[in-house]
Image: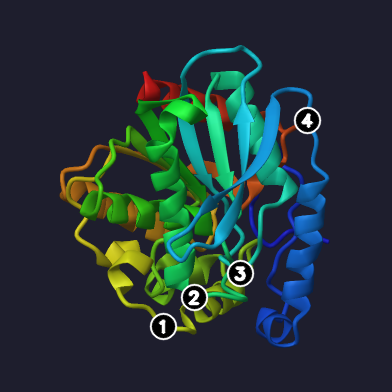
Amino acid sequence: MRQKYNYSKELKRPITFGNVDMNKAVENGAMLKCAGFMRKQTERYKTKKVQLEKDEYPSFDGKGIKFFTFTPKEKKEKYPAMIYYHGGGFMFPIQKFMMNSSVSYCERLGIKVFLPEYRISLEDSCDTIIEDCYHMLKYVFENAERLGVDKGRVLVYGDSAGGCLAESVTLLNRDRENYHLRGQMLVYPVCDNESEKYASVKNYKDAVWSEKANETMWKTYLKRGTKNIAYVVPIKSDLKNLPPAYIEPQEIDILRDEAVAYADKLKAAGVAVEVNIIPGSYHGFDSDFRSSLVKQVYEKRYQVINRMLI
């Protein structure tokens, strides 16, 4: 069967959400069951490449939020650190790919990676999710000495919906404690709930992350309302005085144009931004670790992260 879009031949053929009725799956509980299955997979995850630990930190309401810490085998008193907000449409928990990616960054760059299992939109509000993510940042900075973290060398990272959460956290951080962040890494990030105004949505509506899936994501994320939409949808915010950003949209992705628009707004606000659109790539393409294209992209990310944390 011929592919509808001109994906790179260096990538494996993707599976699209285009034919999945995600609204129905949310309503009948199928998505929640899927989330439970993913959590079980993550609980069984093991690696010999780095030191993997599991712990909890307190969120704004006292709820203990699970997080994973990936520490290089080379022992140091303090490490640079990345706080990784995982993707999954705000609806799914951590998946194996995010664990693999965390191991990769930790091992290659010699940094600590913190991966929080924030609450999800199938069960909680967008405000709760953002606060969970912010309190991971707060926990790392306030416990830096015990955690072995160099507070002067910390960045946030997010892919897809996690990119949106990383954006939200940088805004909350600026307006609250204002801990020093060296950068924000945003990979095929969600940026705007008004997606229909972007050409990439119509051009790639049936691509891996489909227009229908995106609509369900925002409907579920916003269904309980919010106290401040500007934190929930970062492109609606004043973006001044934020840390430098690396933004990586994928060429064949409905989220491409909103990521570029977010980058443009950051630049207009005086923030240093690097945009890197990956030709022939699709949403979630970087889970294909064997691909030569994916290896090249990770090399670029390593360089950027290393530059941010020097």
How far separated are the C-alphas under marks 4 and 1? 39 Å
Q: Given this view, does label 3 or label 1 mark the residue nearer the observer?
A: 1
Foreground label between 2 and 3: 2
Q: Are marks 1 and 2 in contact (CB under 8 Å)?
A: yes
Nearest the camera: 105 or 75? 75
* Label located before the other in sequence (4 or 2): 4
Kind of residue at badge 2? Ser
**Residue type indicated by callout 3:** Ser
Label 2 crowd bin: few (<14), some (14–19), many (20+), radius 10 Å: some
Between 22 and 141, the residue placed more toward the observer is 141
Mark 3 or mark 1: name the one nearer the start of the chain.
Answer: 3
Q: Quadrant of the C terminus?
A: top left
Instruction: Give amino acid for label 1.
Output: Gly
Q: Disc 3 marks which residue?
A: 210
Tell me the quarter of the picture where residue 244 sits: top left
Q: Mark 2 points at which residue?
A: 125
Q: Is mark 2 on a helix, strand or loop?
A: loop
Residue 88 x %, y %: 61, 60
Amino acid type at image mark 4: Thr
Where does label 4 land, which residue?
47
User: In the rendered image, which residue does mark 1 sit on?
Assistant: 225
| Local crowd size for mark 1, using a 10 Å CA cut-off: few (<14), some (14–19), many (≥20) | few
Q: Is mark 1 on a helix, strand or loop?
A: loop
**Position in image of residue 178 (x %, y %):** 24, 45
